[in-house]
Image (cartoon, helix red, strand yellow):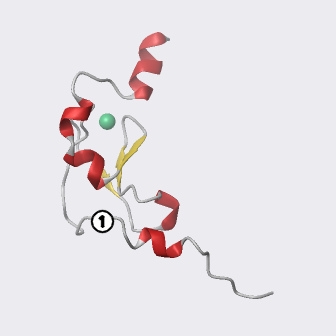
Amino acid sequence: MKNQKPTYDFLYDNYAWPEPGTERNCPFSGIPLQLNEKRPGYNGKPWTCPQCIWYFSEEELEDVDAFKGKDCPHTLEQKAQ
Ligand SMILES: [Zn+2]
């Protein structure tokens, strides 16, 4: 079998990925986010909130106004139960 390099690999090089040791807080819950390793599986989203179980890209976190007054989808599910 040929060792095929995925054709979408180059796309991930274009994503902003924070330096190790960078800290950010979840725009929904305010708790510290977990910084993921740079892997294609994360689809360009370096940040995970362990409480919301939600992924964020650097670009999304720059735009904090977009999160104002919103609950994360998981929090909303929990409230409905
Ligand atoms: Zn969160």
Closest to the observer: 5 or 55? Answer: 5
Q: Residue at x 36, y 36 (%)?
A: 51
* Looking at the image, residue 7 lies above or below residue 53: below
Q: State the residue position of label 1.
A: 17
What amino acid type should be assigned to the residue bearing mark 1?
Trp
* Looking at the image, residue 10 lies above or below residue 48: below
Q: Position of residue 73 (x, y in %)?
A: 43, 27
Residue 76 found in image quarter: top left
Q: Position of residue 22 (x, y in %)?
A: 19, 61
The total of numbered circles placed on residues is: 1
Q: Residue at x 47, y 20 (%)?
A: 77
Side of 16 where 54 appears, left or right = right
Instruction: Report helix, strand or loop for mark 1.
Output: loop
Does residue 34 show up? yes
Q: Quadrant of ligand 1?
A: top left
Q: Position of residue 81 (x, y in %)?
A: 50, 11
Q: Residue at x 23, y 38 (%)?
A: 31
> How many C-alpha atoms fall within 10 Å of the one at disc 1: few (<14), some, or many (≥20)?
many
Q: Residue at x 28, y 52 (%)?
A: 59
* Looking at the image, residue 29 lies above or below residue 32: above
